[in-house]
Image (tube, coloured by chain):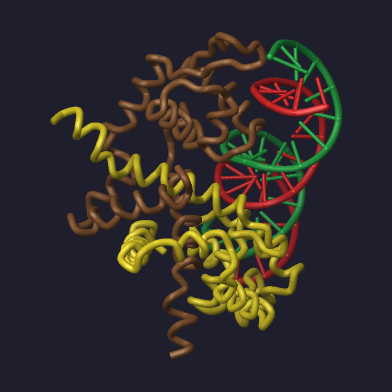
Chain colours: A brown, B yellow, C red, D green
DNA sequence: TATTGTTATACTCTATAACTATA
DNA sequence: TATAGTTATAGAGTATAACAATA
């Protein structure tokens, strides 16, 4: 009983390792070269929530402002976001998804030749439903 | 219909972002200081599969040998694993979970004060079951 | 004086390439 | 010559601390 509990039902530990290892796989399998997962995540937030300031984007992505400064700089270089002045506050600026950024996100969503898509295609409908529900729960837990 | 499909059913994209963001949270919320998630993952593999060579451990963890060299070196420094000579091949060595490493894993599993445990405690039983099933599916997909 | 954002710097995690030791 | 492992080096991703500009 005690043993079973400590070995078999450590959901936090299991989930933690699963996430760490799948994250590793996702990053290593990525051969795209143009954008990183971190950049895609920021672009997806801009698509979902609309234009916002760097600080707001950092808060949405749960990273610190200096980290987001670097992500935004790389996205600007590649033309995937654009920056405009804040209408009333000279310190702030507004980061907006560019048409190229929106196109890239759409292409990502329809590119079905990637590693994860292939693995998902091998699952049953029921398993995919479970994963879809899990992503909702995870997003809620992570505050995204 | 088309819009709904492209926005609502990109399971790969949703899962990818959920994993990237939860991984970020897990690493940033970690205040332990003694071991990293990467180290815990390696220790957990040694517990589950038993002693093995550095190459085998790298393959199990799906990282390259030089990456595992560094993980093992840090675990050795902290006394969480021990190394012994391979009985027949002078090139190889055997990495084994030490009693301190096993203790640390047990302590991790029973430390219920951490961020993820608190988030999980706020969920319903049904949601936790969904996550438990999802971890199994993910582990199968990631080949672990 | 407080806030927004950036720059400087450092650490973790991971990779590839080159090297050493042994088979 | 091939294999196991390490060392050297680099890049992504993130952080804290210090600074600049504006409020």
Residue B23 versus residue B114: which sits nearer the camera? Answer: B114
Residue B16 sits in quarter: top left
Q: Give the side of residue B118 with respect to residue B140, left or right.
A: right
Q: Establish if B9 lies above or below B79.
A: above
Residue D17: horizontal and vertical position, in percent?
A: 83, 37
Residue C13: horizontal and vertical position, in percent?
A: 60, 51
Residue placed furthest toward the bottom: A1
Residue D11: horizontal and vertical position, in percent?
A: 61, 33
Residue depicted at 55% across the width and 47% down the height: B24
Q: Establish if B67 lies above or below B120.
A: above
Residue B55 sits in quarter: bottom right
Residue B54 sits in quarter: bottom right
Residue depicted at 43% across the width and 46% down the height: A26
- The image quadrant where one finds the N terminus of chain B is top left
Q: Establish if A126 lies above or below A23.
A: below
Q: Give the side of residue A114 with respect to residue B111, left or right.
A: left
Q: Give the side of residue A50 with respect to residue B52, left or right.
A: left
Q: Give the side of residue A50 with respect to residue B71, left or right.
A: left
Residue placed furthest toward the left: B1
- The image quadrant where one finds the C terminus of chain B is bottom left
Residue depicted at 32% across the width and 43% down the height: B12
Whether residue B94 can be seen here: no
Residue A123: horizontal and vertical position, in percent?
A: 23, 56
Residue depicted at 43% across the width and 19% down the height: A97
């Amino acid at each position: 009983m005690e043993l079973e509990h400590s070995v078999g039902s450590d959901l936090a530990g299991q989930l933690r390792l699963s996430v760490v290892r799948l994250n590793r796989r996702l990053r290593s399998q990525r051969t795209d070269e143009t954008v990183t997962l971190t950049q895609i995540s920021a672009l997806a937030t801009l698509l979902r929530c609309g234009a916002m300031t760097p600080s707001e984007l950092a808060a949405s992505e749960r990273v610190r402002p200096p980290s987001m400064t670097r992500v935004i700089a790389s996205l600007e270089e590649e033309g995937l976001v654009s920056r405009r002045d804040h209408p009333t506050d000279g310190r702030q600026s507004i980061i907006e998804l560019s048409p190229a950024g929106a196109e890239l996100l759409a292409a990502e969503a329809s590119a079905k030749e990637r590693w994860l898509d292939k693995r998902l295609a091998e699952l049953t409908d029921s398993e995919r439903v479970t994963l879809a529900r899990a992503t909702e729960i995870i997003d809620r837990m992570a505050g995204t």
